[in-house]
Image: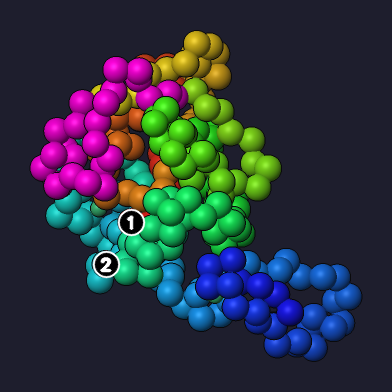
Amino acid sequence: MLGCVWCGRLFSLPLTVAMIWQWRPLPQPALCPACREQLTPIGSQYCPQCGRQQATSEVCHDCRRWPDNLRNRALYCYDAGMKAYMQQYKFQGDYRLRLGLQAALSTALKRENYEVLVPIPIDQRTWQTRGFNQVTGWLTGQPFQQVLAVTATHKDRPQSAKTRQERLLTPQPFELVAGAGEVLANRRVLLLDDVYTTGRTLRHAAQQIYLGGAKAVTSLTLAR
Ligand SMILES: [Zn+2]
Ligand SMILES: [Zn+2]
């Protein structure tokens, strides 16, 4: 029996003939089938720019308003189920929940074309209250470079507490850490964040990464 890291219930996997013949233990899912059903993977049709699930493969309304074309891919729809997951993981600080999405992120990272992985950092106050960066919590040994930091002067309300308009007007919250240029020079960089909402945070980050000398910047988020 396995214990679900989200709902806490015990569950077992149906044993298949393939599992018996292969002899090797399959990776154990951290979420029970009912909890996995709460999350909606983004299907085959999505905005080619921000990765939002939609009925067409055209650039979406929100993306047409951005002057650039930062390319983002996302794993799951940011719907009620994903919001409930993020609420418990990020805001209630339930660190075990990271286990629920590690395998999916690992698979998604293999599809991305990059040389340097840069997670979006969290600010000092969040470190003190939450105690972990939700983004690096999903990584399972993949190398990453923490070349971005939240500036010391950045005292802002959380993005989640703001309206769309307020988010879009957020001043640059990031700076490059010492030595970032050596890591970034002429490299293809993949930014990693939890949720793509307006795209403002990722664009601030991409701007700094380009200043650091990167030749290309794309991004991946758990949800859109
Ligand atoms: Zn569960
Ligand atoms: Zn879009």
The disc label shown at residue 224, or none: 1
Q: Give me the C-alpha separation between circle 2 and circle 1.
A: 11 Å
Q: Does residue 8 appear to the left or right of 46 in the view shown?
A: right
Q: Earlier in the sequence, mark 2 or mark 1?
A: 2
Q: Secondary structure beneath disc 1? A: loop
**Of 2 and 16, the residue lying toward us:** 2
Q: Does residue 67 appear to the left or right of 123 in the view shown?
A: left
Q: Amino acid at mark 1?
A: Arg
Quickly name the residue at label 2: 54
Residue 18, x across and y down, in percent: 79, 83
**Of 29 and 72, the residue lying toward us:** 29
Q: Residue at the location (70% across, 87% down)?
A: 14
The disc label shown at residue 20, or none: none
Q: Amino acid at mark 2?
A: Gln
Magenta range is 148-171
Q: Residue at the location (65% across, 81% down)?
A: 11
Q: Is residue 148 visible?
A: yes
Q: Residue at the location (80% across, 88% down)?
A: 17
Q: Is residue 209 visible?
A: no
Residue 45, x across and y down, in percent: 34, 67
Q: Cβ(mark 2) to ligand 2 < 8 Å? A: yes
**Which residue ends up furthest to the front in the rendered image?**
129
